[in-house]
């Protein structure tokens, strides 16, 4: 339960100067400027110098990006926490060489 006046996970907003969710995970769907998506650990070309998504809210933003919402579990209290959490999630969900999940 959240304290009165504090945002719930549904209301949580992105941390300024973070961008972890635009760097750590792989994205297999096309992104404007990255037609083949992007590998894990590579900065998305749509991540601006202010660490904000430049195509946020646009129809050509990948659905996976819109489904990844800020949360206490993922974001923690620092960008470093978010990067580690997302890197672990990426490793946990990456397909193995036989087409299954690791």
Image: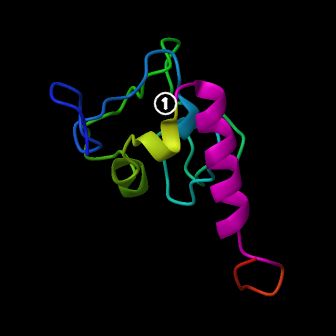
Residue plotted at (57% across, 54% down): 27
Q: Can residue 7 be seen by looking at this rendering?
A: yes
Q: Nearer the viewer, residue 71 or 38?
A: 71
SS for callout 1: loop
Residue 47 position (above or below residue 22): above
Magenta stretch in the rendered image: 77-96
Residue that protrudes farthest toward the top in the picture: 50
Asked whether residue 12 is drawn in magenta, I would say: no
The residue tagged 1 is 46
Q: Quadrant of the C terminus?
A: bottom right
Residue 72, compared with residue 102, is above or below; it is above
Q: Position of residue 39 (x, y in %)?
A: 70, 50
Q: How crowded is mark 1: few (under 14 residues within 10 Å), some or many (20 or more)?
A: some
Residue 79 in the magenta stretch? The answer is yes
Which residue is at 71% across, 85% downward?
100
- Quarter holding residue 92: bottom right
Q: Residue 74 appears at what percent x and percent y? A: 51, 44
Q: Is residue 53 left or right of residue 78?
A: left
Residue 35: give x, y in percent of width and height. Answer: 55, 50
């Amino acid at each position: 339960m959240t304290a009165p006046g504090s945002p719930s996970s549904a209301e949580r907003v992105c941390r300024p100067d973070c961008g972890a969710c635009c760097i750590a995970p792989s994205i297999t769907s096309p992104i404007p400027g990255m037609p083949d998506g992007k590998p894990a650990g590579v900065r998305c070309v749509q991540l601006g110098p202010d660490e904000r998504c430049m195509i946020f809210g646009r129809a050509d933003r990948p659905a996976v990006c819109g489904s990844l919402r800020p949360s206490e579990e993922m974001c923690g209290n620092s960008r470093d926490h978010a990067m580690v959490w997302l890197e672990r999630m990426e490793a946990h969900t990456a397909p193995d060489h036989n087409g299954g999940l690791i």
